[in-house]
Amino acid sequence: MCAKATMEEFEALLNDSLAIDTPQEGSVVRGKVIAIEAGQAIIDVGYKMEGRVDLKEFAAPGEAPEIAVGDEVEVYLDRVENARGEAVISREKARREEAWDRLEKAYAAEQRVDGVIFGRVKGGFTVDLGGAVAFLPGSQVDVRPVRDAGPLMGMKQPFQILKMDRRRGNIVVSRRAILEESRAEQRAEVIGKLTEGDVVDGVVKNITEYGAFVDLGGVDGLLHVTDMAWRRVNHPSEILAIGETVKVQVIKINKETHRISLGMKQLQDDPWDAVERKYAIGTVHKGRVTNITDYGAFVELEPGVEGLVHVSEMSWTKKNVHPGKIVSTSQEVDVMVLEIDSAKRRVSLGLKQTMRNPWEVFAETHPVGTQIEGEVKNITEFGLFVGLDNDIDGMVHLSDLSWDQRGEDAIQNYRKGDVVRAAVTEVDIDKERISLSIKALGDDTFSEAIDGVKRGSIVTVNVTAIEDGGIEVEYNGMKAFIRRSDLSRDRAEQRPERFQVGDHVDARVTNVDSKTRRLGLSIKAREIAEEKEAVEQYGSSDSGASLGDILGAALKDRN
């Protein structure tokens, strides 16, 4: 009986032990710290199982471990037994599993989570979220690029989970989202108190090429470079410094984007209000060259008031020259006000108008007929350009080069750099043109030779050469040519060989061409004219007289 009872009790105990839900590998179990030795905590997880965990697994990054004998902790059961008969457990894995459960709930609810930045990796940082390690991209650290993230590391702060994948063990978080949200709330609060036109104090937070960002107490406003001063500002750093407190006016508020435009010049008097009164058209003022472009130069008349000297108004003589070769930046110059457009805030200025027109000066000092001397600056197909005083040129046309030579031939006698003498023949101030003549300095041999000779005149010429096409003759030292067909009225007599060099012949002038400097002569025309004259004086063939009788009477009367 006793034996039977003992067996039943043993069976009951066995069944009870088998019924105990022993922990499975890969699960989180609760244990008790029973000892701490050699940098490890010995933990009893029950079921007669003990394991060891490094103390560092109980510490947060950068902190000392907080654990003592008797503490109850949750650990991850990796294996029930190792080679030494101990359970393989991990606090870190337990925290990770716990953290993932917690983070998944926070991610689903779009809640913030606390974490600590503890390491730097390529492209960003690592964050401890209480057991789970997340990645913080560099672009998500702050609203603006962070040069030194050292002050942010090791400090507990909130993060927003952007993405998580438990299977792959990936978590991406953002600190910037938290800042933007808080800044948006703060910005909305500050903007709600501001109205356009308000004058407020702000601190210069950042300076860029196009302006400066000013902190208005939780919200930044942009002070554009064009709104800093009425004068030209090349770079904001000329008048502002980071950390400086400035008084600004709220120009515009965008309620949707929460952007605020600020201005400083609006707090000063607008110099353009008095421009038309101070700078009357036609008056001359001193100014400073502030900027030079391809099309002209900007001249500051006073701070905030600039005018443009167009390249066409810079010099009387330098037409195709870059403005930078006439004036230089910061140079003080005298300018004349040509036009004012207050609506567009534009002033047209003239530089050359402050100096006398050199063509006017030349016309006054060099009346027509005045002889000048100058250097040949350029040679073109239509004449010579001669350099004169005050950087102006005069032109000698081909037709004014020589009395005796064709212009195309005469121009071959000149080279660039030659010094020539010429007479002033015309000065056109409006067209900025000066006409010169070299041949006017010499005698006109052609005019002297034909002095008093007109078309229809009878002249006596000397034969100088016999040619197949006619004869060459000379009149007062001037050569002329009588063609074969003009040698006689009678075709049989149109033979050049009937003349000899040295013969004196009477010919009729058919043409006087001053341009080509040629005299047209014809013996035939003379004979016809004489015949016509004789017929008119001594009768006609119709009255019964023969042509021979008429000509005979005419010759007898002449003799």
Image: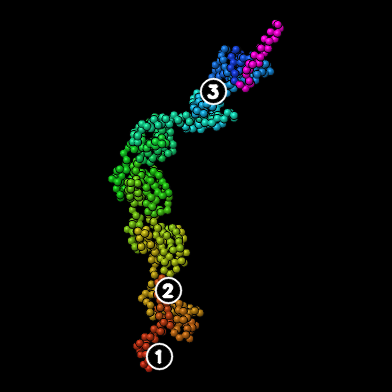
120 sits to left or right of 4: left
User: Residue 378: horizontal and vertical position, in percent?
Assistant: 44, 59
For this orientation, the residue located farthest to the front is: 1
Sequence-wise first label, 1 or 3: 3
Q: Secondary structure at mark 2?
A: strand
Task: Indicate which disc residue 193 carries.
Answer: none
Rendered location of residue 40, percent (x, y): 61, 16
Residue occupying the point 45% across, 81% down:
486
Q: Nearer the viewer, residue 61 or 95?
A: 95
Chief SS of the magenta region:
helix
Range drawn in magenta: 1-27
Q: Which mark is residue 518?
A: 2
Give the amino acid at mark 1: Leu
| Residue at figure coordinates x 35%, y 41% from the top left | 304
**Labels 2, 3: front one:** 3
Residue 90 to residue 189: above or below: above
In the rendered image of this protein, does residue 224 appear above or below residue 400? above
